[in-house]
Image (cartoon, grey):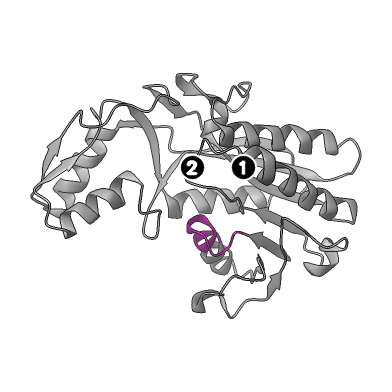
């Protein structure tokens, strides 16, 4: 099976590539022409494509894959930037449309739990999207546009709503890397929010195994939450990490306000 992956050099993408390798699949890596290919990925076929301006024959340029796993997305971690709606949304729709209109039959796209907006509690994949951030709105809009595109071109669409993933290589602004950096810096105190918000965290290795399995289910259209289904408070998450590592650092709860764009309690239904 030929599998193309966009965003392969990112946090999620590198784990997706490792999972495909574990399944003895050598993916076709779609990267911006200006991207420096990491040594760990250099043994795979790399196809330079600018998603903001893809070629007309993008399916052929990608070597006509059986499946596209589309992870690429710019503008993060600024969830409120209008660039998600003005630049990313139209560009990614054009890219995928170009591929399916010329023969691509199976597409799996990484969505986000931010599509649910301020809905609280256990979030089922069949809930209507009610995004409040530009990022969430752009992803939800892309999903709707691709569903409509299925009436024009025959292709299967798997939409994976990712919740909170953690593991080696994640963005430095995430809560656990920020905590680790504070410890390495010798800080005595770690400033954080009140920590009572409930979130759905999942190790990135487990999440990507599920994502790849979903992507390889060819001919199937569905929406799925990529999550643990088990909520944990941010406070407990941080305290567990400190205990596991044996770190000595005091937690200063309430230093930062709770995010206004997330409900206090939400997690995914698996």
**Near-viewer residue (16 or 49):** 49
- Residue drawn at (63%, 24%), measured in percent from left and top? 126
- Residue 245 picture location, percent across and down: 16, 54
- Residue 27 picture location, percent across and down: 65, 68
The CA span between labels 2 and 1 is: 9 Å
**Near-viewer residue (82 or 174):** 82
Q: Let me know if residue 9 is in the magenta part.
A: yes
Q: Secondary structure at mark 2?
A: loop
- Residue 171 picture location, percent across and down: 40, 53
Asked whether, in this view, residue 220 is left or right of residue 192, the answer is right
| Quadrant position of the N terminus in the picture | bottom right
Tell me if mark 1 has few (under 14), some (14-19) or many (20+) residues whose alpha carbon lies within 10 angstroms of its own. some
Residue position for label 2: 78
- Residue drawn at (72%, 48%), measured in percent from left and top? 92
- Residue drawn at (26%, 25%), measured in percent from left and top? 196
Q: Let me know if residue 143 is in the magenta part.
A: no
Residue position for label 1: 83
Q: Is residue 137 above or below residue 242?
A: above
Q: Is residue 38 above or below residue 152?
A: below
Tell me if mark 2 has few (under 14), some (14-19) or many (20+) residues whose alpha carbon lies within 10 angstroms of its own. few
**Near-viewer residue (49 or 45):** 49
- Residue drawn at (77%, 38%), measured in percent from left and top? 146
Q: Which residues are magenta?
A: 7-16
Asked whether, in this view, residue 92 is left or right of residue 19, the answer is right
Q: Are the residues flagged by discs 2 and 1 in contact, CB closer than 8 Å?
A: yes
Residue 170: numbered disc? none
- Residue 205 picture location, percent across and down: 44, 55
| Earlier residue among tags 2 and 1 | 2
Majority secondary structure of magenta residues: helix
Q: Is residue 268 above or below residue 160?
A: above
Asked whether, in this view, residue 220 is left or right of residue 73, the answer is right
Q: Is residue 264 above or below residue 160?
A: above
């Amino acid at each position: 099976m030929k599998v193309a992956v966009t965003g392969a050099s990112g946090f999620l993408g590198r784990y997706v590539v490792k999972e495909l390798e574990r399944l003895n699949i050598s993916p076709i890596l779609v990267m911006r022409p200006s991207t420096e290919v990491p040594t760990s990925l250099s043994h795979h076929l790399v196809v330079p494509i600018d998603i903001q301006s893809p070629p007309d024959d993008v399916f052929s340029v990608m070597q006509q894959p059986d499946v596209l796993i589309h992870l690429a997305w710019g503008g993060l971690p600024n969830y409120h930037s209008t660039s998600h709606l003005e630049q990313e949304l139209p560009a990614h729709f054009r890219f995928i449309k170009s591929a399916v209109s010329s023969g691509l039959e199976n597409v799996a796209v990484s969505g986000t739990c931010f599509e649910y907006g301020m809905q609280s509690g256990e979030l089922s994949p069949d809930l209507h999207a009610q995004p409040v951030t530009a990022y969430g709105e752009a992803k939800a809009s892309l999903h709707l546009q691709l569903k409509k595109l299925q009436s024009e071109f025959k292709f299967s669409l798997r939409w994976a709503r990712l919740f909170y993933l953690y593991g080696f290589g994640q963005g430095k602004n995430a809560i656990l890397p920020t905590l680790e950096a504070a410890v390495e810096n010798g800080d005595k105190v770690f400033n954080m929010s009140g920590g009572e918000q409930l979130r759905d965290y999942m190790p990135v290795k487990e999440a990507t195994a599920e994502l790849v399995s979903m992507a390889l289910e060819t001919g199937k259209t569905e929406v799925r939450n990529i999550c643990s289904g088990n909520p944990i408070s941010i406070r407990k998450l941080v305290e567990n990490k400190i205990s596991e590592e044996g770190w000595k650092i005091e937690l200063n709860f309430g230093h930062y306000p709770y995010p206004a764009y997330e409900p206090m309690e939400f997690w995914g239904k698996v």
